[in-house]
Image (cartoon, grey):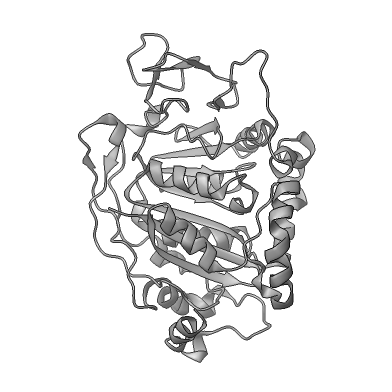
């Protein structure tokens, strides 16, 4: 693996690499390098990008996406370059999905069949409905005012279950309140470049999917969900989280910022049981989230299941290999860390690439800065 990585890094002119111990460079000085990193390096290609959608043969299959061509690095060298904003939106992508404004992509988390209006039991659901109903098992999912609760156990009177500590922590009102008031900002110590640059990088990876439906998985208080809505790049943004209080906080920010919810749906769901029609989603984004998922493998498999062919998964997290002496210790101790805290420790980008490949996602590409990594993978055709 070391030799392969050296060969990849030889392809990158030294002038385009950041100094070893230097922080993020100004975007004006690195925009050209950004395009090279995201489009030119490496010997593999990203899966062809998305053109105008054509209909699948069944509603459960969702939208099928023909492809054009987008090149990107399979494994760019460690870099913190930020995509040029003009390039990020210059090329047209998929046609707007006119059927998604009325929640037509939501599905029952038990049987995965599309949800329908509980009024006539057959029409596509809309935001004006007070409840949704599964078209197969007839389970009813009521609106919680701030969001739709589409978890498996919703409606249970006696049964309850607890999640791992990391998941329960983010369900508390205090952490939900603090998340955008200092908590998330502290990620800069780990190399996270800041919200605006993260969003620009994500937009470049997701550029082929604009005009379709995007899911902001583990959206928290809606940091990126609100940016996706305000950008107008997607026909529908599904802000999805397991935390009730995070979704309530997201709704408060939406009202405070006077953001229209016409193209936004807030959904409470389990990342390992996504209530979405199979093969119907163009893009899934998960910012600083995968390390908190109880089972990343189950979650990425679900994401692969709901993505249409050519759909793109973009996520960011922490990689612990910045401290080489600690890697052997973490390798031994991380099963216990996971059992106690519910958090996951990743030791290399190769682990994330292997996870994506195992779940049917190909053409893995990434950028790194310190502990920070943003990566992208595409649903195979």
Across and down, in percent, residue 364 comes to: 42, 64
For the residue pair 94 and 230, the one nearer the viewer reads as 94
Q: Residue at x 24, y 60 (%)?
A: 68
Q: Quadrant of residue 160?
A: top right
Across and down, in percent, residue 325 comes to: 73, 77
Against 308, residue 27 (above or below) is: below
Q: Is residue 232 visible?
A: no
Q: Is residue 158 left or right of residue 286?
A: right
Q: Residue at x 44, y 35 (%)?
A: 263
Q: Residue at x 58, y 83 (%)?
A: 18
Q: Quadrant of residue 205?
A: bottom left
Against 94, residue 269 (above or below) is: above
Against 71, residue 163 (above or below) is: above
Q: Is residue 128 left or right of residue 243?
A: left
Against 142, residue 47 (above or below) is: below
For the residue pair 274 and 239, the one nearer the viewer reads as 274
Across and down, in percent, residue 6 comes to: 49, 86
Q: Residue at x 65, y 49 (%)?
A: 292
Q: Residue furthest right?
A: 174
For the residue pair 257 and 113, the one nearer the viewer reads as 113
Across and down, in percent, residue 126 comes to: 41, 22
């Amino acid at each position: 693996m070391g030799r392969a990585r050296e060969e990849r890094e030889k392809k990158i002119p030294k002038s385009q690499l950041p100094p070893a111990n230097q922080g993020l460079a100004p975007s004006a000085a690195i925009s050209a390098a950004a395009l090279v990193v995201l489009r030119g390096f490496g010997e593999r290609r990203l899966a062809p990008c998305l053109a105008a959608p054509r209909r699948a043969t069944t509603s459960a299959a969702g939208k099928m996406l023909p492809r054009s061509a987008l090149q990107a690095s399979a494994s760019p060298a460690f870099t913190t370059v930020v995509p040029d904003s003009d390039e990020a939106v210059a090329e047209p992508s998929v046609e707007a999905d006119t059927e998604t404004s009325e929640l037509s992509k939501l599905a029952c988390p038990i049987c995965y069949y599309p949800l329908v209006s509980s009024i006539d039991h057959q029409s596509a659901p809309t935001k004006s409905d007070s409840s949704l109903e599964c078209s197969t098992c007839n389970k009813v999912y009521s609106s919680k005012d701030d969001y739709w609760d589409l978890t498996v156990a919703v409606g249970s009177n006696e049964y309850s279950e607890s999640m791992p500590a990391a998941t329960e922590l983010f369900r508390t009102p205090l952490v939900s309140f603090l998340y955008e008031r200092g908590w998330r900002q502290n990620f800069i110590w780990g190399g996270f470049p800041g919200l605006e640059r993260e969003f620009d990088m994500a937009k470049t990876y997701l550029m082929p999917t604009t005009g379709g439906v995007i899911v902001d998985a583990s959206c928290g208080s809606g940091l990126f969900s609100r940016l996706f809505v305000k950008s107008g790049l997607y026909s529908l943004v599904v802000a999805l989280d397991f935390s009730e209080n995070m979704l309530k906080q997201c709704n408060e920010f939406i009202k405070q910022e006077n953001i229209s919810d016409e193209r936004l749906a807030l959904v409470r769901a389990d990342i390992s049981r996504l209530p979405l029609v199979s093969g119907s989603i163009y893009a899934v984004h998960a910012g600083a989230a995968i390390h908190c998922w109880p089972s990343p493998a189950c979650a990425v498999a679900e994401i692969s299941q709901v993505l249409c062919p050519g759909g793109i998964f973009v996520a960011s997290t922490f990689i612990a290999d910045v401290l080489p002496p600690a890697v052997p210790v973490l390798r031994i101790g991380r099963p216990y860390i996971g059992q106690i805290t519910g958090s996951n420790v990743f030791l290399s980008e190769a682990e994330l690439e292997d996870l994506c490949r195992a779940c049917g996602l190909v053409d893995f590409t990434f950028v790194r800065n310190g502990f920070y990594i943003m990566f992208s993978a595409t649903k195979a055709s």
